Every structure is written in C-alpha cells, then in structure tokens.
Image (spheres, helix red, strand yellow):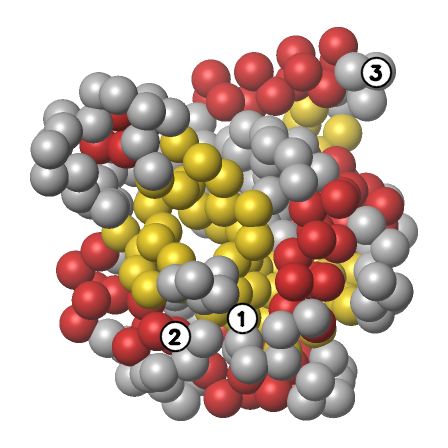
Amino acid sequence: MDTAFKVVIPARYASTRLPGKPLLEIAGRPMLQYVHERALQSGASEVIIATDDRRIMDAATGFEAAVRMTSTAHTSGTERLAEIAEVMAWDEQAVVVNVQGDEPLIPSALIRQVAEGLASHPAASVATLAYPLHRGAEVADPHIVKVVLDKDGYALYFSRAPIPCQRDDPSGTDTVAALRHIGLYAYRAGFLRHYKDLEPSPLEEIEKLEQLRVLWHGMKIHVEMASEMPGHGVDTASDLERVGKILSANGDS
C-alpha cells in the first residue's frame, strides 16, 4: 500500500527521571536525532518535531530537522500533535503518526505500518500496534499495558491489569492469550482537531491511559500485530546506557 502520511515527534525537555531527555547524548548525538532519522526512513512526507522548549528547537535546527514551537500548556503529546495539525492546516483525512522522542530504536517499518493500518480502516479514528505476550510475569506487570480486541481487530479495552483474565489459570504462569500494546499511534488530522474537545474519561483517570478517552467517547482504535519488535525506549539512565550499546553494536552512531 502506498500511503501518504506525516510524522510529528512531540519532545518535552522536562522529565522527572531524566531532565532534558530528548537531548541526552548517545554516541555523541542527541537521542532526538536518532528518532528523527528513523522517522525520515519511514517514508513520511513530512517529519516535524513539536516542542515547547527553545533548547530542543535549537538542537533540532542543528541537525536540520523541521521544528515547531508549541504551547507550554499542553498536558500530552496528543495535544501537541493537535496544535501542529491545526497550524499546518492538514486535510481532515491526513494520517499523522505520533513518534515519541524517547524511542531511538523505533523501527521505521513500524511507523509506516501503523500509518497504513489507519489508512486501510476508514472506520477507525486511531490506529496502533501490539504483539503477543507469553510470560505470566509480563501479563501481571502494571507497567506493561495490555489490550483486548474484537474479531475485526478493533480495541475493546486497554489496561494495566491482566486482560483477558484466565479464570482457570489466574496466575498466568502458562502461555497466555494477552497482547502488549505498543505506544505508537496514527491519527486522522480531523480527529486531532476534535480531540481537545473530548472530556477525559473516568477510566482514563483510573488507568492513567489516555487512549481510553477515545473508546469512552465511542470512537474506534484499530490494532495490528507489529511486524517486528519495537526496541527499547528510554525512561532511565540504565535504559540510555543499554540503548547506546545497541546502537554502537549496530554501527548506528
């Protein structure tokens, strides 16, 4: 499928665990630059870094990225994407992929896959990816978000709890039928413009999962099985060290 799509990389300087995270160096380059390169390799027609911090803007300009300053009032990356969609006056049906600025190992193939997943499912407002979990400890881990689907591949629910719950094996020690959600999203630009008017849902507040707002308001999220593993994101100093070793081993530095 020849899908036209755009990528926006929301990048905040503030981070509880790693202040200035997008600009932390990996093999002599800011982490954000690796993410930007992966996005360019996906075949996106436009790649824009969206930030509210001049330091990130200056760094992005330094590696010749397109960058836009956005409001400091945004509480999520989705809101930042919505501002970009509005400012750029993108068509209502334009496909926009949100690539997090702390994912330097994100495969470019997954960026394209999630864009194509949305383009091929007109009933969906949002598309995302998942992959099977086979270890009970992962299913029980509240830091790992699970998703359950209907027969057509649309999300029924996302949760930090073990879903589906195996009544006959609640410990989940055997092979399980759980799916791990990958936090990579594609949106239609028209949905993004509408998103700011959607009231947060009680479920979203309980689970701390923003995507539940979409389901709460009766809109569809299509989920495909990821064509490959997503790679490690960076949340801690140890993550940064691990990712640096992987990139160096791959000669990507």
- As measured in the structure, the alpha-carbon distance from the residue carrying label 2 to the one carrying label 1 is 8 Å
Q: Is residue 1 above or below residue 60?
A: below
- Crowdedness near tag 3: few (<14), some (14–19) or many (≥20) residues, C-alpha within 10 Å: few
Q: Earlier in the sequence, mark 2 or mark 1?
A: 1
Q: Amino acid at mark 1?
A: Val
Q: Secondary structure at mark 1?
A: strand
How many numbered discs sit on the rendered protein?
Answer: 3
Q: Is residue 184 above or below residue 67?
A: above
- Asked which quadrant contains residue 35, the reply is top right
| Residue at 38% from the left image edge and 26% from the top image edge | 134
Q: Secondary structure at mark 3?
A: loop
Is residue 100 toward the left or the right of residue 156 in the image?
right
| Disc 1: which residue | 126
| Residue at 31% from the left image edge and 31% from the top image edge | 176
Quadrant showing the C terminus: top right
Q: Are marks 2 and 1 in contact (CB under 8 Å)?
A: yes
Q: Position of residue 29 (x, y in %)?
A: 76, 29
Q: Position of residue 185 (x, y in %)?
A: 56, 60
| Disc 3: which residue | 251
Is residue 19 toward the left or the right of residue 82 in the image?
left
- As measured in the structure, the alpha-carbon distance from the residue carrying label 3 to the one carrying label 1 is 34 Å
| Disc 2: which residue | 214
Q: Earlier in the sequence, mark 3 or mark 1?
A: 1
Q: Position of residue 179 (x, y in %)?
A: 40, 42
| Residue at 54% from the left image edge and 76% from the top image edge | 124
Q: Amino acid at mark 2?
A: Val
Q: Earlier in the sequence, mark 2 or mark 3?
A: 2
Q: Amino acid at mark 3?
A: Gly
